[in-house]
Image (cartoon, rainbow, N blue to C red):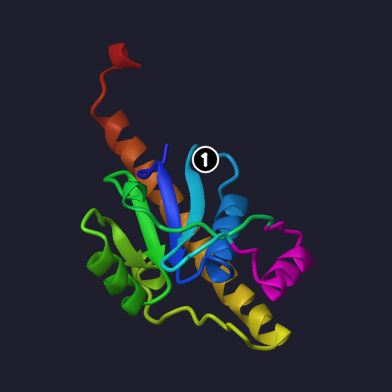
Amino acid sequence: MLEFSKILFVTDTDTSPGPLAATLLKHYLPLEQVNIDSRGLAVLFPEPMNPKTVAIAASKGLDINRTSIQLEPEDFGQDVLVLVLDESRKQAVYDDYAEAVNVYTLTEYINEAGSIVNPDGGELADYAKMYETLDNIIQKLANKLKESKSVSYTHLRAHETPEHL
């Protein structure tokens, strides 16, 4: 079991990189018992996904068929990992939600520098570049989550005696 029971990707409108990141992580962690989803900081009403993001995902065999969801105070918890694209979104989450815990930028969480650029309004090629960047980072995230799982399991197993197994 992973360290977190829920992983949320938070973006402004929850219509492009957040849902894509969630879909990619589900793809790379198909057997894990974890709720992976996305939320938006400014979702006034449910909106469909960005068509360019949907097209790029579909070209890679991924289906993003959902509408945007507003981030709510009850989305937070000690067992929830919240990942944002950049420092300003991280600060916005902490500023707007007193309940916020475990909020990191996606690159910060995997010990890398930089931010993910949302190509909102850009060309299809810009969305393809975002996909490639996210795919690379999400693979690293999946590996880190799996490693932290095996470290926790190894630690637990090292402290058990044979009669506990």
Residue at the far left: name it. 98
Rendering quarter of residue 83: bottom left
Q: Is 59 included in the stretch rendered in magenta?
A: yes
Q: Provide residue 60's location: percent of width, then percent of height.
A: 75, 65
Residue 150 higher or lower than 125, as above or below: above
Quadrant of image for the C terminus: top left
Q: Is residue 15 left or right of residue 9?
A: right
Q: Residue at x 58, y 51 (%)?
A: 26
Residue 76 higher or lower than 156, as above or below: below
Q: Provide residue 52's location: percent of width, then percent of height.
A: 71, 75
Total marks placed: 1
Q: Camera-side residue: 35 or 162?
A: 35
Secondary structure at numbered mark 1: loop
Rendering quarter of residue 156: top left
Residue wearing tag 1: 32
Q: Provide residue 64's location: percent of width, then percent of height.
A: 67, 58
Q: Provide residue 63's location: percent of width, then percent of height.
A: 72, 56
Q: Residue at x 62, y 75 (%)?
A: 132
Q: Camera-side residue: 148 or 91?
A: 91
Question: Which segment is the magenta one?
Answer: 47-64
Q: Is 37 included in the stretch rendered in magenta?
A: no
Q: Judge the density around disc 1: few (<14), some (14-19), many (≥20) Cα neighbours within 10 Å.
A: few
Residue 100 higher or lower than 13, as above or below: above
Rendering quarter of residue 53: bottom right
Residue at the far top: name it. 163
Q: Is residue 89 left or right of residue 91?
A: right
Q: Camera-side residue: 93 or 36?
A: 93
What type is the residue that disc 1 sits on?
Glu
Q: Residue at x 38, y 75 (%)?
A: 112
Quadrant of image for the N terminus: top left
